Amino acid sequence: MLEIEGLTKFFGGLAALSGVDMRVKPGDILGLIGPNGAGKTTLFNLVTGFLRPTKGRVIFEGKDITGKKPHSIAAKAIVRTFQATNIFPDFTVLQNIVLSCHLVPKIGLLETVFHTPSSRRKDEDILQRSQAILELVGLDTMADVAALNLAHGHKRILGIAIALAAEPKLLLLDEPLSGMNAEEVSETMRLIDRLWQSGITILLIEHNMRAAMSLCQRIVVLNFGRKIAEGSPEEIKGNNEVIQAYLGAGEYAP
Amino acid sequence: MSTAALLQSILNGLALAGIYILVALGLTLVLSIMGIVQVAHGEIYMIGAYSVYYMFVALGLNFFLAIVISTLLIGGLGVFLERSCFRPFRGQPDRALTISIGLILILQNVVLSIAGGHPRSYTSPFPGVLKILGISISWERLIIVLVGLVLLIALFLFIRTTKTGQAMLAISQERDGAALQGINIDRISALAMFLGCALAAIAGALIGALFSIYPTMGSFALMKGITVIILGGLGSISGAVVGGLIIGLIDGVMPVLTTTYIAGLIGFATIIIILIFRPQGIWGHE
Amino acid sequence: MNKRIMISLLSYGILIVCICFLPFFFPGPYHLHVLILTMMNIILASSLRLINLSGQLSLAHGGMMTIGAYTSTLLVMKLGFSSWLALLMAGFFPAVIACLVGFPFVRLKGIYFAIVTIFLGEMIVLTAGQWRSLTGGSSGIFNIPRPNPLVIPGIVNITFSSKVDFYYLAFVLMLISLLILYAVENSRIGLTLRGIQQTDSLAESVGINTAGFKVLAFTIGCFFPGLIGGFYSQYISAINPDTFGFLFTIYLLVYMTVGGAERFIGPILGAFILTIFPEVTRPLKAFVPFFFAAVLMVVIFFMPEGIAGLPERLHKAIRKLLEKKTNHA
């Protein structure tokens, strides 16, 4: 489904990503791990068009999407979440989702300004879809809360819900569990699992090693911008290079 | 066009460059240390011009004394503005911008009501010309270039050698990091405003000796200042110098080669293009 | 809900009727002129706010008005267009220019966008002042004809020979403009623009073409100053390159900020109060700019959401007061 060939990104003299190859097959749930600064978010940015690669290609469903604008990549049903700027703070939770239903259905500019019957039907549609998504992620009771007032864990879940509104075939989650307590972590893990079961292909960056290992079928490990290992969670756990990378960076080993 | 005319226009350009560099330095100091584009900078320049005018013409003070006193007073005004208007909004550049805009209105109209709207001019305190190699170099323009050079070197040395200067450099590069190192941002910001306004005031004073002054002359200086710092790269002193030289020389020479209109148009268009394609300016970093 | 809508509509209806009858209470040409200026400023400040919704500060309004004024004037005087078609073109031409320059411009963030819009405005004024053959140079154009008469045999015969006719024309333009701006803002376009203003990378990630929407806001926003520029040229009958300069654009910014850029009614309030007040206090004319600046400062320091945010502030303050009282009880 997604093929990454020799993806490289230089910032000045620094190689954030260096010749990374990767394949994601439809229905996969793949984890992307590595110490801080390994280039994981950079990879997301390159795949989804927020950065242009210095070298290499990104191919999705057979078509070259390298360097395309983020919104057109989203239109191809590749949607990502963010670590930091992941919600619309001044909107209510419901409005966050309603806006994010931008792609589905498509509402024309003129028809929305004139509030034509067809646009009103689509608005109804969107409202129902939005409420359904909120129910799915468990935020339906907070639909009218301003997003910035949400607890941190709920904000991250809202971020996932926003991505879902765009109806992704391939979902890139950037540290969805960060800052969550144990209960939130297990709930969100269940959510991610359910999303995967429903047919969404998932690529997951996570620092929470336990979660990544238990959720994902395959793991790719990055360090200093290079891929150093790829395989099943068991293989990765025992991989010496991976252990070295984490010990060397002072983080806990898998 | 004769060589003499060309050389003359180059000298004009250098004098203009001197003024532009002073204005741009002040603007970029405030921008890199306080993070705001102080759009009332042009009005400070204008107040410098009027202040020296009054002291020199109405009070009969020695020209240099007038400049020194004006500079100190206006620098003090800058410190006051920093304390009252900009410090409360550190970290909110949008509101600081709107405050700056309000300052434009206030300052322009204070001067308007005191001095009236008609342009004023005075005979230069440095009359006469220096004749070298067949061209006449007016003393005024020479003084401007010299003063500009001296101030530039002084500023450069200040930043390179003194502790405070180094602190300013640190803040301009990384505001939060500098605070963590114990650098007093309040004091340095006040100093930045003092220096920035002082430089603008000197520039205004010097140009008053060349051209007539009027209450709305500030917008000209602001446009030139912004043009120079965008060209040379924001926060870069050397960029401001080189940018000022380029723009000054262009403004000096172009009108002789083509019409003022085309020159002006090219000037604005160039900046727009630079902002779009190379926003860090010619010498800046990303 | 229905009751609320009814009350809203009723109050707007009454307001509209009042405005229609104003000329009978203030028939003097001076008063009418002030009212016309007020309505012009309301349209200008509100359109500035639309661009601001997407998070961009545009200071090109003055330049767009200049383009509109000259467009309408030249179409009528040199090409014999009907003044009504010229008026429409006066709006569309700047909008087209905004659309063209918009694409590179919207890539710039914050103050840099504002700077290029300022420079664009300066280039326009420079061109208007120098292109002698087209625009009459810095002295401008005089004797611009009044709008073509509106004739419906037997019912109306408006010849625009008196200020009152212009008053009603301005009123109609204001109604239509505010309606359009309101409709755009309350459609998904408005929602999208506000989302872009908050977190534009997130908007991109769900498929929103943020650059495209910003250009859309800029384009629509620049239609109205063009329209008003055209109207003004037909109203005052004379234009020159400096009529709508940088300072004028800044005043529009002040109207919007003081009134409150958050709410739709903000710029309307700001433009209304800040246009009428200086005229009402004519004797103190010299103090007007100070007054403006002072009000601007007060708003920035103490009421960032502007005058339009006052009712909510009062509401909160009163509630707090009541809470304190019941706590002590």
Image (cartoon, grey):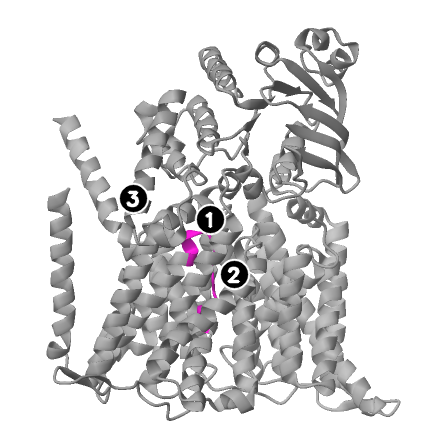
Residue B68 position by quadrant: bottom right
Specify the subunit that label 2 lies on.
C
| Residue B160 point in image, percent of width and height | 76, 51
| Residue B112 point in image, percent of width and height | 43, 78
Q: Residue at x 49, y 78 (%)?
A: B215
Q: With respect to residue A143, does C236 lie above or below?
A: below
Q: Which residue is mark 3?
A: A120
Label 3 amino acid? Arg
Check disc 1 and report its element: helix, strand or loop: helix
Q: With respect to residue C18, does B159 lie above or below?
A: above
Check disc 2 and report its element: helix, strand or loop: helix
| Residue C216 point in image, percent of width and height | 46, 57
Specify the subunit that label 1 lies on.
B
Q: Residue at x 75, y 70 (%)?
A: B245
Nearest the camera: A210 or A12? A210
> Furthest-right residue in view?
B133
Tell me the quadrant of the picture where the C terminus of chain A can be found.
top right
The image's mark for residue C114 is: 2
Nearest the camera: B278 or B6? B278
Q: Is residue C198 visible?
A: yes
Bounds of the magenta segment: C51-62
Along the horizontal axis of the image, is C135 left or right of C86? Answer: right
Label 2 amino acid? Ala
For the residues marked 1 and 3, what is the alpha-carbon distance in whole angstroms?
Answer: 43 Å
Along the horizontal axis of the image, is B257 left or right of C124? Answer: right
Is A218 covered by the magenta stretch? no
Q: Is disc 2 in the same subunit as disc 1? A: no
Specify the subunit that label 3 lies on.
A
Q: Which residue is mark 1?
A: B89
